[in-house]
Amino acid sequence: MTEPAAKRFPTPSLADMPEDIRARILAVQEKSGFVPNVFLSLAFRPDEFRAFFAYHDALMDKDSGVTKAEREMIVVATSAANQCLYCVVAHGAILRIRAKNPLLADQIAINYRKAEITPRQKAMLDFAMKVSRAAETVVEPDFAELGRHGFSDDDIWDIAAVAAFFALSNRMANVTGMRPNDEFYLMGRLPK
């Protein structure tokens, strides 16, 4: 049995972080009650932290034809395929909350093809998985299939961008040995 990856890179202390990064981390802590480890891990490289979260927010926080819950489905499915423990657990928690469904994240993480999702969402995840795992094989019929399910070109871009961005995130989380916070495991599991 192999040991889990150890934390490879140092985590700077809050006092040593640039003010804008410290302020963002404290705001997240205020809102969620804890600091997700991704913020602390990526603070090791301040310029990359800023770029990462700027792109993350641009992709994940906007209104579009792909709902916020569906974007989290993309993250969970592709992160499971990329074997990223951090992203499956953290974004699984967000998915449970956004979808208001305590079962969906686990279903998608294990096998989205058997999850209780719509045919439209399955087509979205099929495409996201292709982008994440074999983007060089994306061809025009893939776009046509999404169009048949009502996705616009902007929506298709969003699906691809989320899958591609989280492929980067998955790889960095694995390389850095990032571990999910314990808090994520219980979030959204019981209906309120």
Image (tube, helix red, strand yellow):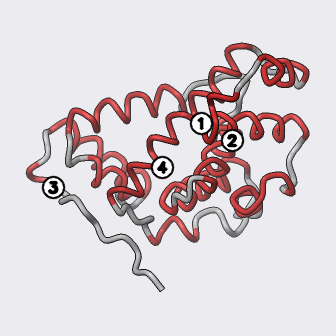
Which residue, given by chain and number where applicable, does mark 4 sit on? 170
Q: Which residue is mark 1?
A: 163
Question: Callout 1: few (<14), some (14-19), or many (20+) C-alpha neighbours within 10 Å?
Answer: many
Of mark 2 and mark 1, the one earlier in the sequence is 2
Residue at the left extreme of this rendering:
16
Q: Which quadrant of the structure image shows residue 71?
A: top right
Q: Are marks 3 and 2 in contact (CB under 8 Å)?
A: no
Q: Amino acid at mark 3?
A: Pro
Q: Earlier in the sequence, mark 4 or mark 1?
A: 1
Amino acid carrying label 1: it is Ala
Q: Give the Cα separation between the discs numbered 4 and 1.
A: 10 Å
Q: Is mark 4 in CB contact (under 8 Å) with mark 2?
A: no
Spatial distance from mark 3 to mark 1, Cα to Cα? 29 Å
Residue visible at 36% across and 70% down in the picture: 5
> Circle 3 sits in a helix, a strand or a loop, which is it?
loop
Q: Position of residue 90 (x, y in %)?
A: 52, 57
Q: Quadrant of residue 190?
A: bottom right
Q: CA distance from mark 2 to mark 1?
A: 7 Å
Q: Which kind of residue does numbered mark 2 sit on?
A: Met
What residue sits right under mark 3 in the picture? 12
Quarter of the image with the C terminus in it: bottom right
Looking at the image, is mark 3 or mark 1 earlier in the sequence? Answer: 3
Give the mark, 4 or 2, whose residue is nearer the N terminus.
2
Mark 2 or mark 3, which is nearer the start of the sequence? 3
Q: Residue furthest front?
A: 137
SS category of the residue bearing label 4 = helix
Q: Are marks 4 and 3 in contact (CB under 8 Å)?
A: no
Label 4 – label 2 distance at C-alpha: 13 Å
- Give the CA distance from mark 4 to mark 3: 21 Å
Which residue: 80% across, 21% down?
151
Q: Are marks 2 and 1 in contact (CB under 8 Å)?
A: yes
Identify the residue at image location x=35%, y=52%. 30
